[in-house]
């Protein structure tokens, strides 16, 4: 089994943070988005990984090599972002003929779902009911939960069951053949999505089972990313259980505070993730993510995303700033 993880996206909806930091390496509850994905795959028995990289790809490559030396990791560069189907197709030469593949998009965090697809005897994918399916790939199901049709971001959805970005494909030879044909036909028109290829496989009578994903965490935009951080921190295994003593500081759980932080005269929490070696003084911070080596002084922040090595001093604001930024709000 090979695992394909496309992480070539630019993360445009999280700019300016993603100008200098890949979206998949954004910290959440003491981990990165990518580490949540890879850790669960390793726990399910995966060892062979193919990462499709592009924007800031060297940072992703270095992170994987340093953090996961035990896995067999290969990296393919997607120079042009021509759709999810194109990203997966780039891995074809690293997959044996008809070898089973698992595809997980690099911004998809789902609690304990990987085991469901590894154990399924058929090709399958995860789905979840959503309020507005027009922003997602959508699946139509029969009464047994088998997929009849999938379509990418339909204008008039026939279902409210969305694809969450986790797939297992047993018939990989057929998938790559369909992707090759679809990409060729779409060279001068729209980008080719993985959803298009899977629908073609279904129409060729390949059986796709589905499984319901209960907890699917959205990491695509600032607001949803902060909500995801809060939801994950509420799980006991991710929040900091024992917080070091910080001078004249109140900690309101749940929080995740990395090693080496210097915090004084502040109120931290709830739902705050702070990276390593951050310095916070005379501040109040809630529902926020603070990057490593950042320095905050005399600020009141809520629902804020602060990059690494940032310096913020001043009054109450809601901010979304990237790495290596200096802001004085006085």
Image (cartoon, helix red, strand yellow):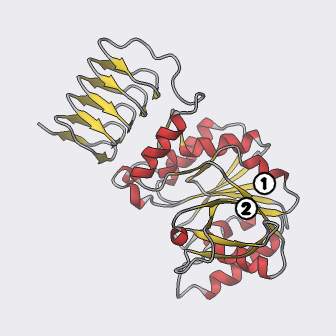
- The reply to whether residue 169 is visible in this rendering is no
Q: How many marks?
A: 2
Q: Quarter of the image for the N terminus: give it.
A: bottom right
The x and y percentages for residue 250 are 34, 18
Instruction: Pick the residue in front: 256 or 160.
Output: 160
117 with respect to 238 (left or right) = right
Compared with 101, 325 (above or below) is above
Q: Which residue is mark 1?
A: 117
| Element class at badge 2 | strand
Secondary element type, mark 1: helix
Quadrant for the C terminus, please.
top left
Give the residue at x 33% y 36%: 309
Q: Using residue 321 as the reference point, say whether residue 174 is left or right of it.
A: right
- The residue nearer to you, when weighing 306 against 93, is 306
State if disc 1 and disc 2 touch (CB < 8 Å). Answer: yes
CA neighbours of label 1 inside 10 A, class few (<14), some (14 to 19), many (20+): many
Residue situated in front as seen by the camera: 157 or 22: 157
In the rendered image, residue 248, in percent from the top left (x then y), is placed at 29, 12
Q: Earlier in the sequence, mark 2 or mark 1?
A: 1
Determine which quarter of the picture holds residue 90.
Answer: bottom right
Which residue occupies 31% across, 39% down? 302
Q: Is residue 310 left or right of residue 190?
A: left
Residue at which label 2 appears: 125
Any part of residue 271 in sight: yes
Report whether 294 appears left or right of 184. Answer: left
Residue 159 figure quarter: bottom right
């Amino acid at each position: 089994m090979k695992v394909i993880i496309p992480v070539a996206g630019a993360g445009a909806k999280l700019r300016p943070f993603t100008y200098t930091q890949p979206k998949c390496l954004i910290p959440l509850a003491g981990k990165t988005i990518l580490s949540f994905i890879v850790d669960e795959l390793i726990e399910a028995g995966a060892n062979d990984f193919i990462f499709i990289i592009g924007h800031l790809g060297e940072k992703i490559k270095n992170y994987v090599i340093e953090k996961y030396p035990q896995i067999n990791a290969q990296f393919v560069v997607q120079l042009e972002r021509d759709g999810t189907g194109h990203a997966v197709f780039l891995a074809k030469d690293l997959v044996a003929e008809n070898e089973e593949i698992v595809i997980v998009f690099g911004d998809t965090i789902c609690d304990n779902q990987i085991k469901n697809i590894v154990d399924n005897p058929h090709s399958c994918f995860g789905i979840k009911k959503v309020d507005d399916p027009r922003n997602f790939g959508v699946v139509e199901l029969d009464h047994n939960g088998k997929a009849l049709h999938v379509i990418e971001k339909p204008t008039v959805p026939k279902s409210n069951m969305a694809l969450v970005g986790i797939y297992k494909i047993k018939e990989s030879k057929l998938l790559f053949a369909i992707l090759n044909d679809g990409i060729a036909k779409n060279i001068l028109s729209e980008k080719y999505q993985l959803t298009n290829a899977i629908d073609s496989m279904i129409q060729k009578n390949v059986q796709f089972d589905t499984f319901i994903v209960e907890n699917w965490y959205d990491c695509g935009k600032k607001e949803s990313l902060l909500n995801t951080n809060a939801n994950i921190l509420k799980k006991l295994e991710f929040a900091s259980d024992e917080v070091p003593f910080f001078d004249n500081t109140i900690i309101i759980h749940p929080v995740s505070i990395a090693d080496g932080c210097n915090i004084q005269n502040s109120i931290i929490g709830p739902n705050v993730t702070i990276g390593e070696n951050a310095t916070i003084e005379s501040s109040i911070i809630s529902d926020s993510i603070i990057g490593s080596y950042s320095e905050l002084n005399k600020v009141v922040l809520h629902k804020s995303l602060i990059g690494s090595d940032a310096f913020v001093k001043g009054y109450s604001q809601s901010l979304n700033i990237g790495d290596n930024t200096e802001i004085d709000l006085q």
